[in-house]
Image (cartoon, rainbow, N blue to C red):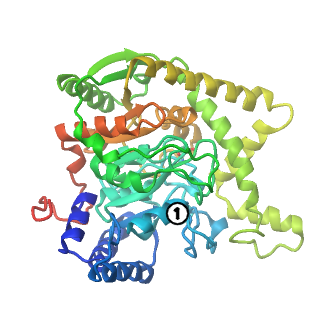
Amino acid sequence: METVREWLNALRTGECSARDAVTTALERIRTVDPQLQAVIAIDPERALAQADTIDRQRAGGEDPGPLAGLPIGIKDVICEKDVECTCASQILKGYRPPYDATVITMLRRAGAIPVARLNMDEFAMGSSTDHSAFAITRNPWDTNRIPGGSSGGSAAAVAARMLPCALGSDTGGSIRQPAALCGVTGLKPTYGRVSRYGLVAYASSLDQIGPLALTVEDIALLLPHLAGHDPHDATSANLPVPNYPAALFQDLRGVRLGVPKEYFIAGLDPAVETAVRSALHLFARNGADCVEISLPHTEYAIATYYIIATAEASSNLARYDGIHYGWRAPESTTLDEVYSHTRRRGFGEEVIRRIILGTYVLSSGYYDAYYLKALKVRTLIRQDFTRAFDTVDAIVTPTSPTPAFALGEKLNDPLQMYLSDIFTVSVNLAGIPGLSVPCGFSPDGLPIGLQILAKPFDEMMLLRVGHAWQQLTDFHLRRPPVCATSFSRPTTHA
Ligand code: GLN
């Protein structure tokens, strides 16, 4: 049992009870996670109790839901009632949210069982998971390398087959980039497609929750249980949720794919370029029409993103004051000391850097030059995409300019770290959906990801193109050296 479909088949036929499913996932975590450290916490009793309820419902002839018994991992930035939620930060140690995020409520209603809290860069700020305050997560393809970030725990846990699927969050690439670097499939939905209620805010105008799994088919099975309008999130869209699995029955014929020339630049690893170019040939051979397009404001994306994201972060993170949430520096004697000691010691270096940057670009005298200007450039970037989608159905690019880099390699060079988001941040600035699928391997055996983009709310197109791609290739089924299941494909559950 590896893919969501395989797990659900086994659960539906009764080959595996919900209790067996949770036990299997926990066993896999116990066996493999010590090498990877993707998991921050597990709560076996809670997960097994939910499993037993599902098994009882099934035994009593009730329908426990379309995802009944499916174990899922949750990035430690999404609230589950009474479960510690740390955002991989010292400052939130001990914080137990009093409510469930809407995605958690929806998943539980469908019968899915959250079994693990997954590691990440502190407050989702980073591209390597090096910035976690608790553990260094390793890439299952090479444990001396980073899994990507900030949803590095989610990507590593799925790649190593500990869990069939996980939730991540994506503000500037945090689902797609780790998915690419770990060789799994990850979707950042359109801004407003999935409720952000219960997602700890990093940059509220960019953040989205999305799924990571092994296949596009699995993403299509999960998305109906995440998407939809939520009165608790004023930015969630009041639009019908399409029948996502129906996208899997369409092929590539007649699909117009745009290839932006600004994405094939100096700094792009030759292995990544080769893999993406061969993908384009395969698309063309299978009926898609590939055309070169231009997204002329691409070169401003990183600067624009790091102004807007840090500005919003500086405001969102003001609430961690040592009083409202989590941890408080114990030695403080005055109110000012509570604030300053708690924030100085509770936040890591990268988070502090961003709060300072964000405060600077919002401060009087600099607001117009930086923040206001960035908002204007954001509009230009969004218009680039709107114009492109007048002539193409989807856009295809590399997800990340390089395969996974070494642990700690970019830790002391923030600019280099920021540049690893060069192909992903525009998507959040424009609010459009993006999917990353495995598309090859580097000469060192590291996975490479292909990013597919579509118009706002056209997740169907992403699933169609992504699934067609996975029907033509098998990169998504290859297993990393650190893997919880055996090296032969299971036949019984296929
Ligand atoms: N790496 C980007 C950043 O550090 C994106 C992070 C994210 O998407 N949460 O901000």
Number of numbered discs? 1
Residue at 58% over, 57% down:
199
Residue 224: x %, y % from top left? 40, 52
Quarter residue 390 falls in: top left
Instruction: Identify the image quadrant of the C terminus.
Output: bottom left
| Relative horizontal placement of residue 271, taking residue 41 as reference (left or right) | left
Can residue 308 be seen here?
A: yes
Q: x, y percentage for residue 419?
A: 52, 35
Ligand 1 positioned in quadrant = top right
Q: In the image, residue 107 lies at what x, y percent?
A: 43, 63
Q: Quadrant of the N terminus?
A: bottom left
Q: Residue furthest front?
A: 61
In the figure, is residue 377 to the left or right of 462? right
Question: In this figure, which residue is indicated by the disc labeled 1?
Answer: 76
The foreground one among 52 and 286 is 52
Of 8 and 337, nearer the camera is 8
- Would you identify the image quadrant in which residue 122 lies? bottom right
Which quarter of the picture shows residue 8? Answer: bottom left
Q: Is residue 1 visible?
A: no
What secondary structure is marked by label 1? Answer: loop
- The one nearer the camera, 95 or 38, is 95
Above or below residue 365? Residue 146 is below
Q: Is residue 220 left or right of residue 227?
A: left
Q: Residue at x 41, y 83 (%)?
A: 49
Q: Position of residue 46 (x, y in %)?
A: 45, 80
Amino acid type, label 1: Asp
Vertical relation: 229 (above or below) 103: above
Extreme residue toward the left, this view: 491
How many other residues sit within 10 Å of disc 1, few (<14), some (14-19) or many (≥20)? many
